[in-house]
Image (tube, grey):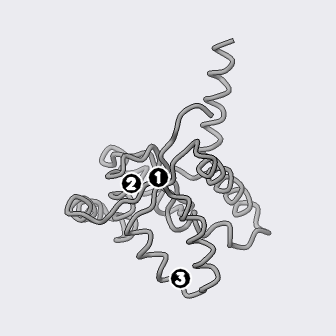
Amino acid sequence: MSKQYRIYLDACCLNRPFDDQTQSRIYLETQAIITILNQCQLGNWKLINSSALIAELNQTPDIDRLQNVQKLLSLAKIKVINSPFIETRSAQLQQLGFPSYDATHIASAERSQADVFLTTDDRLLKKAKTNYQLINITINNPVQWLTELIQTEESNDENSK
């Protein structure tokens, strides 16, 4: 994979590998997330962490799950600290109807100049699609994003032959 993507995984994504893998959708999303995290571990892509992610994840009641998710997040090479920009932007996004955490995650991803913000939250994806002109970042589901990325790279390879 050629480009070094900067990727913001929201709390849903980071928790997905620890959800019930007997459901097809959850299993597929987990495989996509693991593939993305592997690329980050190899240093090909950069995972982004944020104050918002840490705050949300710290509310996880299951300590084992929390520690497992924190291990995944330890791969992050970029950390976005809360700032006046993020607070202002988060407030603007909340005006559009995004819940507080989602708004802060999107603002953090924008601030870090992430290439993509990935989530498995259908409500968030739907709201992002509705407001895409007002959001300065691509928001997608990990399976869909990875599939599109692989197809694009394969067609680029075909064109360069």
Q: Which residue is mark 1?
A: 117
Which residue shows up at 57% across the image and 63% down it?
A: 13
Q: Position of residue 39 (x, y in %)?
A: 63, 47
Depth check: give the residue in front, 99 or 59: 59
Give the mark nearer the N terminus: 2 vs 1.
Answer: 2
Q: Amino acid at mark 1?
A: Phe
Give the residue type that dot 2 points to. Answer: Ala
User: At numbered mark 1, what does the secondary structure look like: helix, strand or loop?
Assistant: strand
Residue 129 image label: none
Residue that lies at the very extreme toward the top in this rendered image: 161
Residue at mark 2 to residue at mark 1: CA–CA distance:
7 Å
Disc 3 from disc 1: Cα separation? 21 Å
Q: Which residue is mark 3?
A: 60
SS for tag 3? loop
Residue 18's x, y, as percent?
68, 72
Going by the numbered disc 3, the residue's amino acid type is Thr
Is residue 20 found left or right of 109 in the rendered image? Answer: right
Residue linked to disc 2? 109
Residue 86 coordinates in the image, percent (x, y): 26, 61
Q: Is residue 158 above or below residue 36?
A: above
